[in-house]
Image (cartoon, helix red, strand yellow):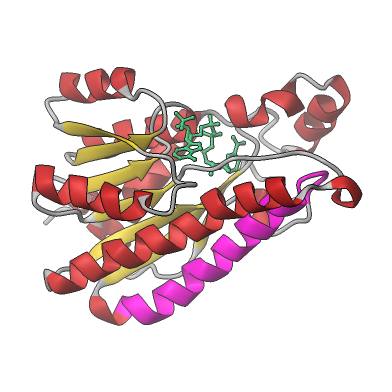
């Protein structure tokens, strides 16, 4: 097998949460382009991503689910197994952010962010990994972390706690699942131009300060994650376990 073939995902089935727009939509398309069929999860419509995947001659399934709902992970996995018969790759991408100073941060915002960004990731990963073990198959879990898996951030205490927890969870799951042939890794995007960062990009001071600190001298785009997700989902990264790969224009090295 040539090294380029090790990046292919033909015959694989991926689940991507938060696939309706932004980073999740681009990663779903990248996985499809590499050969995978994809289950697309979001509260809203994934119709445009689904059409783009069809244009690549791959199949997709749109699953309407709110990851704040504790029954969602089971429903997502069941729907995927019913449609495709299996799931090989899970990209835990869906995430929310609520901004306020810690002194005024509400319990509601804390719970909402931790539920979607951390709790649902664990519960869905556990169900997904159990299905792989049941099938006696390997597979891959890719968690979407953040610069705030490493740094404190400003006015986002719940988000930082969740994303820092996610980096730890990535290592904890990798320790247990690597011997079973399941690769668990994370991608930590830098500052990317999506809805999630709209408040930062429209604040002239924050926007200027962030851009000035990025060695690559530009905000990231969803397309910047396409290579990283295919790498971590494919046999090309077979011996990579428990890592958090930064895709950040050099931010963490500065
Ligand atoms: P985005 O543009 O706001 O997209 C978020 C996605 O998650 C959407 O598809 C959204 O779809 C879905 N989602 C949100 N809440 C959900 C819920 N309760 N249940 C199911 N789906 C839900 O954000 P993004 O920038 O692409 O971010 C994607 C991930 O990357 C997040 O985990 C984020 O924390 C992380 N990240 C982003 C950046 C950045 O600079 N943008 C940097 C580091 C990390 P619906 O609204 O239709 O449900």
| Residue 118 among those drawn in magenta | no
Q: Position of residue 164 (x, y in %)?
A: 64, 61
Looking at this view, name the residue that lies furthest to the right: 103
Residue at figure coordinates x 72%, y 37% from the top left:
214
Magenta-colored segment: predominant secondary structure? helix
The image shows residue 80 at horizontal and vertical percentages of 19, 46
Dividing the picture into quarters, in which one does residue 177 lie?
bottom left
Which region of the structure is painted magenta?
A: 153-178
Asked if residue 173 is among those painted magenta in the image, a careful observer would answer yes
Residue at (20%, 67%) from the top-left corner?
A: 132
Above or below residue 17? Residue 78 is below
Taking depth in this image into account, of 129 and 245 the one nearest to the observer is 129
**Rendered view: 239 above or below 41:** below
Identify which residue, 205 or 108, lies in the foreground: 108
Q: Quadrant of residue 34?
A: top left
Left or right relative to 102: residue 172: left
Residue 8 visible, this orientation: no
Across and down, in percent, residue 32 comes to: 23, 35
Q: Residue at x 88, y 25 (%)?
A: 205
Q: Tag count in the figure?
A: 0
Foreground: 106 or 192? Answer: 106
Q: Position of residue 218 (x, y in %)?
A: 66, 27
Q: Is residue 238 left or right of residue 159?
A: left
Give the residue displayed 81% in from the left and 32% down from the top: 212
Can the viewer see residue 80?
yes
Where the N terminus falls, by quadrant? bottom left
């Amino acid at each position: 097998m040539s090294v380029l073939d090790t990046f292919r995902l033909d015959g694989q089935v991926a689940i991507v949460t938060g696939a309706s727009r932004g980073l999740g939509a681009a990663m779903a398309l990248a996985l499809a382009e590499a050969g995978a069929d994809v289950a697309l999860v979001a509260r809203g419509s994934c119709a445009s991503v689904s059409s783009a995947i069809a244009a690549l001659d791959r199949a997709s399934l749109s699953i309407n689910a709110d990851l704040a709902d504790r029954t969602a992970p089971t429903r997502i996995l069941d729907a995927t197994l019913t449609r495709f018969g299996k799931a090989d790759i899970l990209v835990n991408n869906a995430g929310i952010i609520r901004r306020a100073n810690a002194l005024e941060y509400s319990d509601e915002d804390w719970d909402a962010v931790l539920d979607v960004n951390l709790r649902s990731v664990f519960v869905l990963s556990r169900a997904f990994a159990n299905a792989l073990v049941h099938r006696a198959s390997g597979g891959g879990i890719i968690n979407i972390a953040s610069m705030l898996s490493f740094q404190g951030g400003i006015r986002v205490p719940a988000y930082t706690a969740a994303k820092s927890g996610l980096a730890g969870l990535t290592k904890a799951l990798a320790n247990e699942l690597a011997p079973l042939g399941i690769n668990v890794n994370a991608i930590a995007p830098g500052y990317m131009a999506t809805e999630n960062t709209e408040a930062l990009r429209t604040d002239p001071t924050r926007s200027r300060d962030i851009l000035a600190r990025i060695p690559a001298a530009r905000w990231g785009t969803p397309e910047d994650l396409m290579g990283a997700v295919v790498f971590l989902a494919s046999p090309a990264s077979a011996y990579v376990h428990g890592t958090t790969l930064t895709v950040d224009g050099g931010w963490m090295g500065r």
